[in-house]
Amino acid sequence: MPDAVVVTEDLKKYFPSRNGPVKAVDGVNLEVFPGEIFGFLGPNGAGKTTTLRILTTLVKADSGAATIAGFDVLREPGDVRRNIGYVGQAGGADRPATGRENLILQGRLYDMTLQQAKERAAELIAALDLTEFADRIAHTYSGGQLRRLDVALGIMHRPKVLFLDEPTTGLDPQNRANLWIQIGKLRDMGVTVFLTTHYLEEADTLSDRLAIMDHGKIVAEGTPTELKKLVAGDTISVGLMDDRKNAAIAALLAQKPYVRDFTVDDCHLRIVVEEGSKVMPELLRLFDQESIEVATITLAVPTLDDVFLKQTGRTLRDTESAGGEQG
Amino acid sequence: MKLLRDIGLLYKRKLMETLRNPIYIVMSMLTPVLYLILFSPLLNKLVGTGGTRSVLDLFVPGLLVIVAFFNGLFVGYGIIDEIRNGVIERFRATPTSRFAILAGPVLRDTTNVLVIVTLFTLVSVPFGFRPDPVGWLVLLVIISMLIITTASFGYALGLILKEEDRLSPIVQGVNLPILLLSGVLLPMELAPTWLQVLAHFNPVYYSVEAARVLCAGTIWDAKVGYAFLFMVPLTVLVVAWATRAVRSVVA
């Protein structure tokens, strides 16, 4: 495996409060490798944003260490800044200027010449579909348009890692889907992306690998598929035409190595298996051979929320309504 | 050099904002012009009985100083908007010097004030104001220091407080006493001793005193010396403090 581009070691950041220190980041260890989209999933207040701000030199950690592209965030902030792109929760586009002006200034702040900055801006305007509004004042942009400009600003100087903090918060489903496509394009460009989100679907769709964070700690880490395997498995629910063959079915299923668990009652069959999509055709063939008539069949795969539930005892959807403060 | 180039880039960004909305300059002219038309006639009798100096020679130099002060103090509101939109945080994540992030906007404000002060001086001439040209140019230096100081102060407050509701009481709380103790509206010579003593803690007071003698054509005067003596270190201190505020702000 290539050298990690982001490495943290026991990162800690506590904030004082009236009820004693709040452990915003409480011993975070993680590695992000070149070219991957690394998702950081957790409820609001989990410490995702604070971790991101430590990695982007905006906030100093109390203890622990972090390096980006080999540079220490505390001792070599200038080198770190040159190697990262950062799109904060608030975005960062300058509203009284046009998109193109924003991009050119950004490039110039990273020491591009005016000519280089203009060329790169034109390239990104085309690549991220900003053409129709690039020369309008950003005040007039919709939320989705602003977000795309923000992302373009983040990769203007071809950073080694792009940090995106809750990139789709506040966007409607259509704009969210559009931004996912744009973030997917970054993967094709070879940009390493580190993104935080409290949306399950977003973490699941975009991340090559992800870490789930809660109360300042990482509670699980891996590819979305690996993480989902932490929970019981896929569930196949079968509705039968009649219950006459229930005993035979039970005997049949008990023999099959791929069946982890099952229940049969009345006309309803619930089967837990490792990989449902592979097993389902086989099951159907089996039922056919045994002349078992099937009325309905559905497959439920575990979600990241099931993973979160298993690791923390709460669901992300619960915490979402309870949360509110910034992570 | 990167620092100077970045200051230039960030200065240009804010300057474009003003050029796109030149109405701001017109609005800023309104306050001193209203003072000139609606307040200075009140001083006519006062000065007419007391001395030979024309009202405008007494009043306009002070107004020039107070224009710088007003324009600087209220910039905090603008930067709160930029913090909220993540602009400052975005700049902080780039290799740009923290000082440049402050200096760009402050220099834009300085430019604005110098334009306003020049325009207002020109407006006052038909009314009878006749400043000494050399003295007036020296006054621009003092005014520049004052706007750099107050704008940096305003930005630092905005960066630290981050909300308009928290900024307002402080800005208003600073504004009125500084104005009253500056001697702009009426000369501090009219004040009782304790009030005069209090005025000596007000940097704007020294600038106003210096402005009057400078516009009258006296450059080598103790009052001008005091203004520089007070303003130079104050400017350095406030700019350093505001740069620190840039260093730690997050959205």
Image (cartoon, coloured by chain):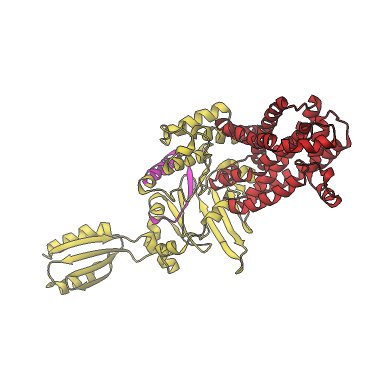
Chain colours: A yellow, B red
Viewer-side residue, A289 vs A317: A317
| Quarter of the figure that contains the N terminus of chain B | top right
Q: Residue at x 82, y 42 (%)?
A: B230
Residue nearest the viewer, comparing A117 with B132: B132
Q: Position of residue A300 (x, y in %)?
A: 28, 61
Coordinates of residue B56 in the picture (x, y in percent): 76, 32
Q: Is residue A94 visible?
A: yes
**Left or right, residue A205 beside residue A28:** left
B24 in relation to A324, above or below = above
- Viewer-proximal residue among B116 and A271: B116
Q: Quadrant of residue A18?
A: bottom right
Residue B163 visible (yes or no): no
| Left or right for A136, reference B61 | left
Q: In the image, is residue B55 part of the stretch drawn in magenta? A: no
Residue B13 locus on image (x, y percent): 59, 34
| Residue closest to the eye, B42 or A93 | B42
**Segment colored magenta:** A177-200
Q: Is residue A197 magenta?
A: yes
Q: Position of residue B83 (x, y in %)?
A: 57, 47
Residue visible at 25% across and 63% down in the picture: A236
